[in-house]
Image (cartoon, grey):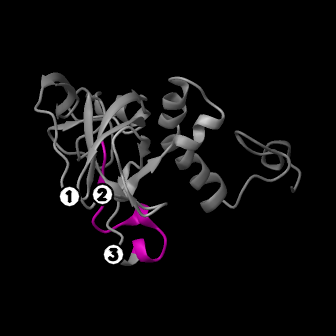
Amino acid sequence: MKALVLTEYGRLEMQDVPPPEPAEDEVLIRVKVCGICGSDVHMAQADKDGYILYPGLTGFPSTLGHEFSGVVVKAGKNARDKSTNRPFKGGEFVCAEEMLWCGRCRPCCDGFPNHCERLDELGFNVDGAYAKYIVVRASVVWNIAPLGKRYSGDDIFIAGALVEPTSVAYNAVIVRGGGVRPGWTAGGRLGAIDGCNT
């Protein structure tokens, strides 16, 4: 299959790679939609000295792409849907978290999986979704069938690919940032702009 692979700092190549096979706790997904994140763009850019512009976790070679949705092709024997505790099965519509957190270290146990001490990231240092197929650990795969109540046809996959970036924004603004207050704008608090103390 074809995959868009980050081969070194700032260098992308379209490569032929073997289709992945799921391990016992993984799900094989046929990618339907994959977004382009700013981090994907920055990983493909290098400065005048050849250094990658993206400052975060990267691995070489690695297939890019983490804002995606698709259809389950098959699942390992221990790959279970954490929301229903039943095995994943072929044909299910899914998306996945980008962060592959361990669930055992102190930050994970404290509810901060984005601070995981053993963190891997889909499309950064683990092969991502700019390919026909991707394998993902079942613990970070989510069923998007409920989106079918609002979206029809392939639009469900577009909405499914937006789950990851929407979750990042929700966590930043609502969970960690404490929410949006009356009078705030996208650029900051209104009071910070007009001098009032709101």
Residue 59 covered by magenta stretch: no
Vertical placement of residue 192 versus 38, above or below: below
Circle 2/circle 1 CB separation < 8 Å: yes
Q: Is residue 23 left or right of residue 124?
A: left
Callout 1: helix, strand or loop?
Answer: loop
Work out how far the residue at label 2 is from the one at label 1, CA to CA, in angstroms: 6 Å
Callout 2: helix, strand or loop?
Answer: loop
Tell me residue 53's x, y (percent): 32, 35
Q: Is residue 37 left or right of residue 162?
A: left
Q: Which amino acid type is shown beneath numbered disc 3?
A: Arg
Residue 49 seen: no
Tell me residue 166's x, y (percent): 56, 43
Instruction: Look at mark 2 in the image and give the residue it sits on.
Output: 79
Instruction: Look at mark 3 in the image and give the residue it sits on.
Output: 104
Instruction: Look at mark 1 in the image and give the residue it sits on.
Output: 24
Q: How many marks?
A: 3
